[in-house]
Amino acid sequence: MLNIPSWLAYALLSAVFAALTAIFAKAGLKDVNSDLATAVRTAVVLLITWGIVFYRGHGREVTGLSRNNWIFLILSAIATGLSWVFYYRALQLGKVSEVSVIDKGSIVFTILLSFFFLREPLTPRIILAALLIFAGMLVLVWK
């Protein structure tokens, strides 16, 4: 069996499920308002994640969250919600293959924002990867 770090396994699973998300969402958006579809998706995610929290016995830990935790988790939730609203609208109007590539362009923004706000290093390898992702986005949108 492969000996890969657990973070990499989770990241690969995330990528696979993100791909399935796009495919299933596009199929589910037929004749449905994209905002309604986002609300349904959000409700299901809410039920699943709270179910996992309580199943694993972490429900009481919510009282231990600091003010800083709450602020940044709420900001993250707002960003997620807006991302999903725009993503579903884009999926409704465009091709899933094109929308998904542009959506994954968020990696470039994440790299830049992590450098400026979290002071994470920008190595030559990370810069090259970001440039290649950006170039791929340009190839896709170039008509």
Image (tube, rainbow, N blue to C red):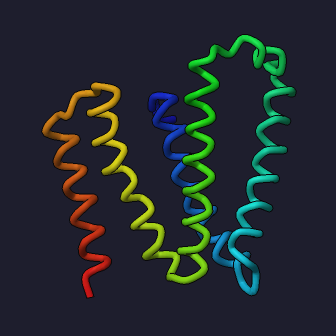
x, y percentage for residue 31? 75, 86
Residue ID at (62%, 17%): 67
Say which quarter of the image contains residue 65: top right
**Residue drawn at x 86%, y 26% as measured from the top left:** 54
User: Where in the figure is residue 20, as x and y percent of width and height?
Assistant: 62, 63
Residue in front for this viewpoint, 14 or 140 = 140
Dividing the picture into quarters, in which one does residue 137 lie?
Answer: bottom left
Q: Position of residue 111 (x, y in %)?
A: 31, 42
Q: Is residue 124 left or right of residue 56?
A: left
Residue 21's place in the image compared with 62, above or below, is below
- As drawn, the residue found furthest toward the left would be 124
Tell me which corner region of the image, top left, top right, bottom left or bottom right, holds residue 61. top right
Q: Residue at horizontal 27%, vertical 33%?
A: 115
Rendered position, 22 above or below 18: below
Point out the image quarter for the C terminus: bottom left
Total marks shown come to: 0
Q: Residue at x 50, y 82 (%)?
A: 95
